[in-house]
Amino acid sequence: MSAVAKIETLLEENRLFPPPEVFREGAVARDATLYEEAARDRLGFWTRMARELAWFKPWDRVLTWAPPDARWFEGGRLNVSFNCLDRHLAGPRRNKAALIWEGEPGDTRVYTYQQLAREVNRFANVLKGLGVEKGDRVTIYLPMIPELAVAMLACTRIGAPHSVVFGGFSAESLRDRINDSEARILITADGGFRRGGIVPLKANADAALEGCPTVEKVVVVKRVGDGSVAGPRKGAGSDAAAAFEADMRGGRDLWWHELMAKAPAACPAEPMEAEDILFILYTSGTTGKPKGIVHTTGGYLTGVYATTKYVFDLKEEDVYWCTADIGWVTGHSYIIYGPLANGATSLMFEGTPDYPHRGRFWEIVAKHGVNILYTAPTAIRTFMRWGPELPAGFDLSSLRLLGTVGEPINPEAWIWYRQHIGGGRCPVVDTWWQTETGSILITPLPGVIPTKPGSATRPFPGITAAVVDEQGREVPPGAGGYLILKEPWPAMLRTIYRDHDRFIQTYWNKFPGLYFTGDGARIDEDGYFWLLGRVDDVINVSGHRIGTMEIESSLVDHPSVAEAAVIGRSHEIKGQAVSAFVTLKEGVEGTAQLNEILKKHVAGKIGALARPEEIFFTAELPKTRSGKIMRRLLRDIAEGRALGDTTTLADPTVMQKLKTQYDEAG
């Protein structure tokens, strides 16, 4: 087989895992009916999904489509907070757990739907009391605590678009996002816990607000100060927390608990037009300036409601855990809005997988009887590196469904996840979607679709995806190309806030009338989609395009490798050469001999064309808090350029260490 042919077929998986019969028999979707319904009448399918929500006024028209502008459920009125809370209060769900929350120190809180509704109503009245009106933007900069969910739902209750800024962002990043959205109110906390230490959120907010003229009031949650945390664990930050005190500016800063104590517990839900803005969420752009992705009310809620119900096969008694941070879209869609619109019990965790020990995730699964776990491939690869003995020490028998999100998953990580976390009995739903898409677009339905390790399988019913070449022509099975979406979908972004031209340029200009995802993909003979990563993560070696995912998969296939990130480095002869940054499993030494073995391993798996020019061993890879590897920064190191923006990294110090190591290695 030629080298090019091997590259094309690297990710072809012969292992097929049909839905377990016991799972299929009880599944929400157990046959192809949904696919057939959507294929016959796509708009009719989405109409049925929307009708499962509560509307104050029905829509006049399902879709108005004038590419690239879509309007879904025009004329209809609804409220997201009402759909996530009020409509569950008339029956037995009012006493069902809506949120189960576990803090890093081990403190816990449980909110029933009735209790959560009261809190949301109170904070909606707090916002009104501060002068917030329908259409006013509110920035939320909080740790993963229940007040974050309350604040979001309160904003939606009164029609104030929220902009959640991830608690790990710097003061500068926060300032940029506040100013772009022109927010009137900022909601933050005195601090948050992170691996036993304290993240000084209020201090960061104060620094940001030195350049934010639109902010009038700051509401501060007391998370760490004055002994406000009660939990079974006394971490490294306990003493510091007891003495922690936020600097409160008179006239501007207000304590959350004091405002809530005075607020009435009833606030009517504002009827919102389906196309009213629900939230703005900032995501990184290739130009460096964050893009304010705008999602609207009716279409977004329809998309996340339907996908949560069918992709995660939700049952009334399930405890569902998405491990993402709400600062990212995954947390918006699949911790808060999708699960609560379905009346589910959603678990929310403040901490990290390795604090105070590496079994914390599995401890939580066992403690709360988690049935559905949705996490990132980068976390799974980390668990692989730590070894299967850790999860084996906990009772994970409650799990019945596993999911992955964030980036393509290596087949080896998929198999490990299924075997060591799911006990070989749990279907794995690998999901593809984006901040921009709002909801999951490519995924198996776990009771219907046989899965293949590493493939996101098929588009969700009602989604029309394709893989095209440079001219926009669909490619044959097995050939790689650009992933595009041919038809509008309800949860799609409507614009980039205050920059519609950038919206058009970024997503619609490459293939007019088609949404360009920016991802590479291929479709196999069975019609399954294989995501190959961002197209700017494609390496052109001597005129041949090689996906970084393909090479990374072959490296992770080696038993010594825990994780790998591959980039293309400029090469005067080849155009680009393959450079690999590799993290080894614990106990494995990064020797010159192993370096050579891994190069040969890649050549053997794919072909000599893909053999890395260099392999650099590193203890850590630069990642965002959502788990994505920042390959752009690795390219900066390899090309000897000044490092780009590192504010989105979970640990920005990793880059400086890595650069020093790389330079010393020559």
Image (cartoon, rainbow, N blue to C red):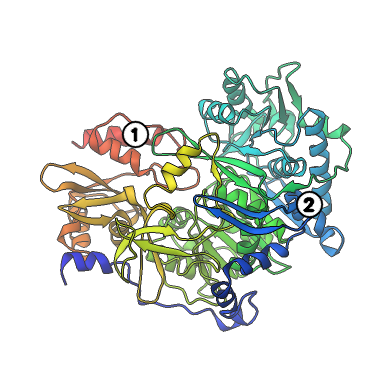
Reply above or below: 172 against 52: above
Q: Name the secondary structure under disc 2.
A: helix
Reply above or below: 67 against 415: above
Badge 2 is on which residue?
82
Reply above or below: 243 against 417: above
Instruction: Compare residues 494 and 480 and report the one nearer the observer.
Output: 494
Q: Position of residue 5 (x, y in %)?
A: 21, 68
Q: Position of residue 477 (x, y in %)?
A: 32, 71
Q: Is residue 103 left or right of residue 582?
A: right
Q: Is residue 588 left or right of residue 78?
A: left
Instruction: Compare residues 334 and 200 and report the one nearer the observer.
Output: 334
Neighbour class for label 2 at 10 Å: few (<14), some, many (≥20)? many
Q: Residue at x 53, y 67 (%)?
A: 460
The three-letter code of the residue at mark 1 reads Lys
Tell which tag, 1 or 2, sits nearer the viewer. 2
Badge 1 is on which residue?
657
Q: Position of residue 588 (x, y in %)?
A: 31, 54
Q: Residue at x 24, y 32 (%)?
A: 640
